[in-house]
Image (cartoon, helix red, strand yellow):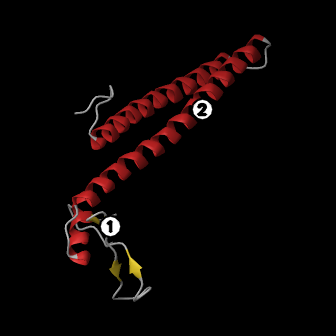
Amino acid sequence: TLPVYNDKVLLCRRAIEPRKGFWTLPAGFMENGETTVQAAARETLEEARRISLAAAIVTQVHLARARLENLLDIYETSQKRVNTAGTLAHAMEVRKREGFASGVDVLSARMDAEVIRLQSMQYEAQLQEAAAALMNSLGTSMDGGMS
């Protein structure tokens, strides 16, 4: 978490190893059934003895952004796979016309390309959901207005 109180970041001095005596941000393990925001608030309370709403908001926005960036990487990779699969399917059709591939080979290449295209569509939907979640955590809507 990044707990802020009176415009200052709260730090804790470590009481145990590793790095006993060093300053650190509040941290710890999540408990069963606890959300990341709940864990951040609880750890801040336990370790810094202050509740920081800013910590929960920063955590929520950070997680939404990290998920969006991860899905964007996956989506971009899937788009490359779609292009590659389409190229391979086309090459297989050319090979069939030239007598070097069977109809089964062409059908298999087309099916692979379609499966990859459908997976890419799923990633695109997840990407849109993640973008909406990030916008929601920032307090704005997808059309740019405040919610």
**Residue occupied by mark 2:** 81
**C-alpha separation, residue under disc 1 versus residue under disc 2:** 47 Å
- Residue 43 marker: none
Q: Which residue is drawn at 20% across and 76% down?
A: 49
Image location of residue 26, percent across then percent down: 32, 72
Left-right relation of 9 to 124: left
Q: Residue at x 26, y 39 (%)?
A: 139
CA neighbours of label 2 inside 10 A, class few (<14), some (14 to 19), many (20+): some
**Front position among marks 1 and 2:** 1
**Residue occupied by mark 1:** 8
Sequence-wise, the earlier of marks 1 and 2 is 1
Indicate the amino acid at tag 2.
Answer: Arg
Q: Which residue is drawn at 43% across and 85% down?
A: 18
Indicate the amino acid at tag 1.
Answer: Lys
Image location of residue 31, percent across then percent down: 23, 68
Q: Residue at x 65, y 19 (%)?
A: 106
Q: Which of 113 and 144 is in front in this view?
A: 144
Figure quadrant of the N terminus:
bottom left
SS for dot 1: strand
